[in-house]
Image (cartoon, rainbow, N blue to C red):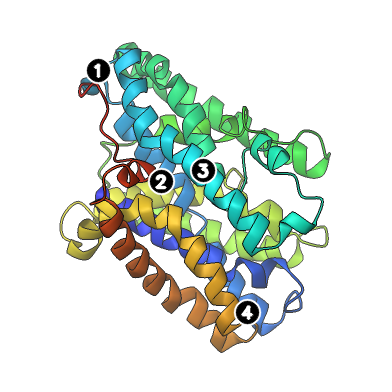
């Protein structure tokens, strides 16, 4: 699963590289530039759910032990310390590099929403899931396959319902304590689906589901209701992204069991790529300009993510060699080594 995680991070970088072109008025909704960005952004929507599913497949493995104390101590070093460190880093980045210190922007409010910067919400999601993992392991250890499927399906349905209600009825907003809840179904499904290797017919069907979901995302983004219809379609628990992500997960698990040497080699540094890439991407965008033509969108969405990933991989490789600093990248040494 390591190559799939590396690939997912690469696609996350691609999302952040072109999202401004989709979301802002840099280009008109529906012109060639917007469509080129939309095609790339929509293609990558599976990346975060698949990363969550892989995390669930590993964390909910009953063979890894169920002692809550040992598990939580290890995850504190892997996720808790980076969450604190990078929340501080990106708050300072927003205040002083982006100039938010001269505005009414509130760091406290940003933290309480569970999204102090564009990618950091994912750490808050993982933190919530980690706290419940020792108890969810009871499901993977003692639950029947039917119970596991049912639990995952209900959780995912709740997440989808939450998205529909919040979008169309403007009810409820995520915060640091609840941000993980709509995505919890992916976490459990990752474990439920982890041993499923597709047959040839199933592979064809999975690809059909993937492209049908992708087409639905594009169609809704173009003709859906509201001024920015893509917001509903893009969300990770939208009725379009859910089947796309499930198909992507089983396809990657089937196609990436062997090989993929490059993605395997950069996997140990993929968490660092996730943490660092906005510090490279957004300042670089100020230097080379926003992607506001078809050519620049393709460059930003297809070429620069690879370059950013390589740069962040090199920085992470170096940082992991420095005592204390490595803890900010989830590589601090826990007191307990089991679990």
Find out whether the residues at labels 3 and 2 contact each other: C-beta distance under 8 Å: yes
Q: Percent x, y for residue 274?
A: 43, 54
- Badge 3, how many Cα within 10 Å: few under 14, some, many 20+? some
Q: Percent x, y for residue 172?
A: 77, 33
Question: Callout 4: helix, strand or loop?
Answer: loop
The numbered dot on residue 177 is none
Residue holding disc 3? 122
CA gap, disc 1 to disc 4?
48 Å
Question: Callout 3: helix, strand or loop?
Answer: helix
- Badge 1, how many Cα within 10 Å: few under 14, some, many 20+? some
Q: Of discs 1 and 4, which sits in the foreground?
A: 4
The numbered mark, 4 or 2, whose residue comes first in the sequence reads 2
Residue holding disc 2? 51
Q: Is residue 285 above or below residue 214?
A: below
The numbered dot on residue 290 is 4
Q: Is residue 335 above or below residue 312?
A: above
Q: Percent x, y for residue 64?
A: 23, 23
CA gap, disc 1 to disc 3?
25 Å
- The structure residue drawn at horizontal position 62% and vertical position 38%, both measured from the top left corner, is 114
The numbered mark, 1 or 4, whose residue comes first in the sequence reads 1
Residue holding disc 1? 65
CA gap, disc 4 to disc 3?
25 Å
The numbered mark, 2 or 1, whose residue comes first in the sequence reads 2
CA gap, disc 3 to disc 2?
10 Å
The image quadrant of residue 76 is top left
Question: Callout 1: helix, strand or loop?
Answer: loop
Find out whether the residues at labels 2 and 1 contact each other: C-beta distance under 8 Å: no
Foreground residue among 134 and 127: 127
Foreground residue among 242 and 52: 52
């Amino acid at each position: 699963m390591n190559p799939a995680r590396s690939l997912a991070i690469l696609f996350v970088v691609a999302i952040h590289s072109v999202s401004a072109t989709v979301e802002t008025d840099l280009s008109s909704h529906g012109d060639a530039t917007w469509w080129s960005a939309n095609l790339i952004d929509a293609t990558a929507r599976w990346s975060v759910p698949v990363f969550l599913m892989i995390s669930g497949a590993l964390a909910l493995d009953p063979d890894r032990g169920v002692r809550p104390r040992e598990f939580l101590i290890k995850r504190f070093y892997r996720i808790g310390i980076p969450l604190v460190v990078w929340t501080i880093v990106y708050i300072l980045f927003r205040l002083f590099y982006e100039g938010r210190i001269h505005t009414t922007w509130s760091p406290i409010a940003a933290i309480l929403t569970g999204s102090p910067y564009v990618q950091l919400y994912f750490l808050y999601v993982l933190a919530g899931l980690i706290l419940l993992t020792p108890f969810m392991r009871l499901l993977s250890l003692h639950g029947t396959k039917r119970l596991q499927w049912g639990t995952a399906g209900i959780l995912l349905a709740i997440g989808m319902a939450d998205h529909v209600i919040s979008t169309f009825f403007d009810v409820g907003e995520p915060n640091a304590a609840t941000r993980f809840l709509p995505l919890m179904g992916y976490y459990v499904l990752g474990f439920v689906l982890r041993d499923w290797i597709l047959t040839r017919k199933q592979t064809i069907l999975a690809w059909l589901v993937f492209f049908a979901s992708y087409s639905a995302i594009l169609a809704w983004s173009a003709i859906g209701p509201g001024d920015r219809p893509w917001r509903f379609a893009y969300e990770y628990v939208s009725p379009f992204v859910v089947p796309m992500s499930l198909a992507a997960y089983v396809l990657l698990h089937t196609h990436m069991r062997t090989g993929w040497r490059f993605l395997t080699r950069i996997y140990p540094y993929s968490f660092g790529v996730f943490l660092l890439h906005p510090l490279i991407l957004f300042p670089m965008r100020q230097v080379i300009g926003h992607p506001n033509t078809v050519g620049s969108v393709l460059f930003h969405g297809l070429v620069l993510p690879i370059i950013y990933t390589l740069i962040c991989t090199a920085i992470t490789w170096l940082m992991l060699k420095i005592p204390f600093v490595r803890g900010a990248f989830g590589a601090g040494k826990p007191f307990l080594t089991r679990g």
